[in-house]
């Protein structure tokens, strides 16, 4: 999608501090981190929000979590614990209309988060 910020990051049109990328996903540091480690995991394919996922994409979220586990290990935050978060819709805090998983760690996480 031509106007999507995350699609532009995935395509290399907008700079980002990428920590991982492959044919299906891109992982980059959040520009407004809420923890010492705060990265976003996005699929290259544009999907606006979680409720837009189809049956054919049912494995995508599981693949994103497996990638989050790998990145958490790479970032050295697995032993201290980490949080993964999806926001779906404006009322939940989604501000970029391209699904993305937040991976946060490096500090104690409290509940409720916000």
Image: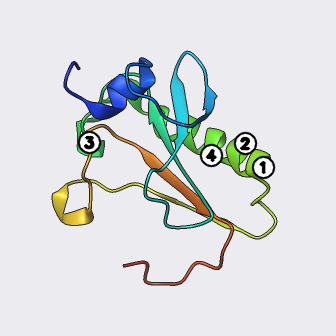
* Farthest-out residue, bottom: 111
Which residue is denoted by mark 3 in the rendering?
A: 49
Crowd band around label 3 with a 10 angstrom C-alpha radius: few (<14), some (14–19), many (20+)? some
Residue at image position (74%, 50%) is: 75
N-terminal label among 2 and 3: 3
- The answer to whether mark 4 and mark 1 are in CB contact below 8 A is no
For image coordinates 52% across by 27% down, the residue present is: 25
Q: Position of residue 12 (x, y in %)?
A: 44, 19
- Asked which secondary structure carries label 3, the reply is loop
Labels 3 and 1: the sequence-earlier one: 3
Q: Is residue 31 above or below residue 14?
A: below
| Residue position marked by numbered label 2 in the rendering | 70
Identify the residue under disc 4. 68
Q: Position of residue 57 (x, y in %)?
A: 39, 28
Up-down relation of residue 45 to residue 94 (above or below): above
* Label 1: few (<14), some (14–19) or many (≥20) C-alpha neighbours in 10 Å: few
Q: Is residue 95 left or right of residue 102?
A: left
Q: Quadrant of residue 64?
A: top right
Q: Secondary structure at mark 1?
A: helix
Disc 2 to disc 4: CB gap under 8 Å: yes
Q: Position of residue 80 (x, y in %)?
A: 77, 70
* 7 and 62: which is toward the camera: 7
- Identify the residue under disc 1: 73
The reply to whether the C-beta atoms of the residues labelled 1 and 2 are less than 8 Å apart is yes
């Amino acid at each position: 999608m031509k106007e999507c910020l995350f699609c532009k990051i995935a395509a290399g049109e907008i700079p980002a501090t990428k920590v991982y990328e492959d044919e299906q996903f891109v992982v980059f540091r959040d520009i407004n981190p809420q923890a010492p480690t705060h990265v976003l995991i996005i699929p290259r394919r544009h999907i606006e929000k979680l409720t837009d996922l189809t049956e054919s994409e049912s494995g995508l979220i599981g693949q994103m979590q497996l990638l989050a586990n790998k990145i958490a290990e790479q970032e050295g935050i697995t032993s201290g614990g980490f949080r993964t978060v999806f926001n779906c819709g404006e009322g939940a805090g989604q501000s970029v209309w391209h699904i993305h998983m937040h991976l946060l760690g490096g500090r104690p996480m409290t509940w409720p988060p916000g």
